Amino acid sequence: MSCGTAPHSFSKTMNQLDSQYDVIVIGAGPAGTTAAALIAEYGHKTLILDRSPFPRFHVGESLIPETYWSLERLGLIEQLKQSAFPKKYSVQFVTEMGKESRPFYFDEYKAHESSQTWQVWRDDFDQMMLDNAVRQGATARTDAQVLDVNFDADVATDIKVRLGEGDSKTDQTIDCRVVVDATGQSAFLASRLGLKSTDPHLKKGTVWSYFENAHRDPDPRDEGATIILQTEGKQSWFWYIPLPGNVTSIGCTGDMNYMFQAGESAEQIFDRELSRCPGMIRRLEGATRCRDYFTTKDFSYRSSKAAGNGWVLIGDAFGFIDPVYSTGVFLALKSGEFAADAIHEAFETSDFSEGVLGSWQDKYVHGIDLFKKLVYAFYTPGFSFGSFLKEHPQYRSNLVDLLIGDVFKLNVGDIFTAMQDVLPME
Ligand SMILES: Cc1cc2nc3c(=O)[nH]c(=O)nc-3n(C[C@H](O)[C@H](O)[C@H](O)COP(=O)(O)OP(=O)(O)OC[C@H]3O[C@@H](n4cnc5c(N)ncnc54)[C@H](O)[C@@H]3O)c2cc1C
């Protein structure tokens, strides 16, 4: 069962590898490819390795507006404008009672072209990002499973990688000055070094699939919107993300133990929650599922630090917070950028210590914490942004800043002073 993207040719990058690089990036998702492109652009000898043949399937299709600035720096805006990816102008929330709120149109708050973003097939988007890293001078291999990162005392010095497929696999050790871990939810180094902790307030699970001919809003300004729909009793919520080819990504997230009950298949879980969400039932009338169901759980976590001597963690390899506000790709791009600049600084000063490589961590964590508070608010029983804004209308633009991803702006977190009493303690 498949739908959406055209069948891809199997594109494996098969460059011969040297025994030494300035920087090795493990993982060719949005974080790794951003870092690799920028580090190579700075002129450092860069290798990017992925264990999956590209293009490869990945969840996470909805971008938020502030990804624009990283994509612009990477030189990819024109390519996105020419693409078939649906244009996203807003996000809309539907309450558990089925009340459809007025969409938050991003350009009502920021009159700039960055206020329109895209809904992307990640196979194609990530391939575009990888091609760009190679264009900037990075060497890439997408048949490369990294088995180990080796240390001399606490300094990362080299990696061990298994290259190739089937019977023709070979192992190679490659030296470098900096290892960038961009391995996504595998969080290779954070797991290896015992740095990772899951978020006790966000023990969630998700079931999702892809549907052809789900209802689309006929208005060009609304047809590409992300819609977030609560189910009755707010036990779970659905995402609705329109993709090219009249395919829609639809997923449901709720407490892990509630979602995954003994003996239920992914389809049964999806159908159980669908029956409690009239707004989604209406949108799926006449639609046909065109891929299998996927599941994932306990995906919100963070590493206690973003860098050490000779190594850096970016994107999901550093941390991930709940999919509700579609912040994952934005954070992957942003941390890839921050890390690339810090790594360049390390080469300029010949100082590859934790202090230099992780110089961006505090600013980044401050931004992530704002998203996290917004997620906590979403899941707080009895809390609703609609009622909150009726009581505190002065925070509406603050809220939109957060929804578009403008988390590094001064004072954007002021909204949380008015929410202090309802949010869980850290
Ligand atoms: C249910 C769900 C829904 C989501 N929806 C959205 C959304 O709508 N919008 C959004 O922005 N984000 C969303 N996200 C988050 C988004 O998917 C991630 O934040 C994003 O993909 C992170 O990018 P990354 O580059 O850090 O990691 P990834 O994109 O996961 O890339 C990591 C890469 O590392 C490779 N790798 C792993 N281990 C090794 C190894 N040992 N050797 C070599 N290669 C390795 C993998 O093959 C992979 O290609 C969602 C997440 C979940 C769980």
Image (tube, helix red, strand yellow):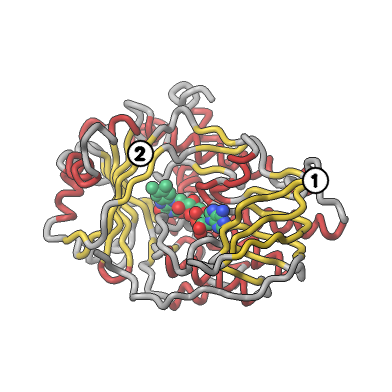
In this rendering, position of residue 7 left or right of residue 47: left
Q: Residue 260, percent across and down?
A: 28, 35
The dot on residue 205 is 2
- Residue 8: image quadrant is bottom left
The dot on residue 379 is none
- Residue 393: image quadrant is top left
Q: Quadrant of the N terminus?
A: bottom left
Q: Residue 185, percent across and down?
A: 50, 47
Q: Residue at x 38, y 66 (%)?
A: 87
**What is the residue that sits farthest to the left in this orientation?**
286
Q: Quadrant of the C terminus?
A: top right
Q: Callout 1, which amino acid?
A: Asp
Q: Is residue 329 visible?
A: no
In this rendering, position of residue 6 left or right of residue 28: left
User: SS for tag 1?
Assistant: strand
Label 2 CA crowd tier, 10 Å (few <14, some 14–19, many 20+): many
Q: Residue at x 43, y 64 (%)?
A: 56
Task: Give the distance between the C-alpha atoms of the residues marked 1 and 2, in whole angstroms.
Answer: 39 Å
Between marks 1 and 2 in the image, the one whose residue lies nearer the viewer: 1
The dot on residue 152 is 1
Q: Callout 2, which amino acid?
A: Gly
**Mark positioned earlier in the residue sequence (1 or 2):** 1
Determine whether 76 is above or below 407 in the image.
below
Q: Residue 390, percent across and down?
A: 36, 34
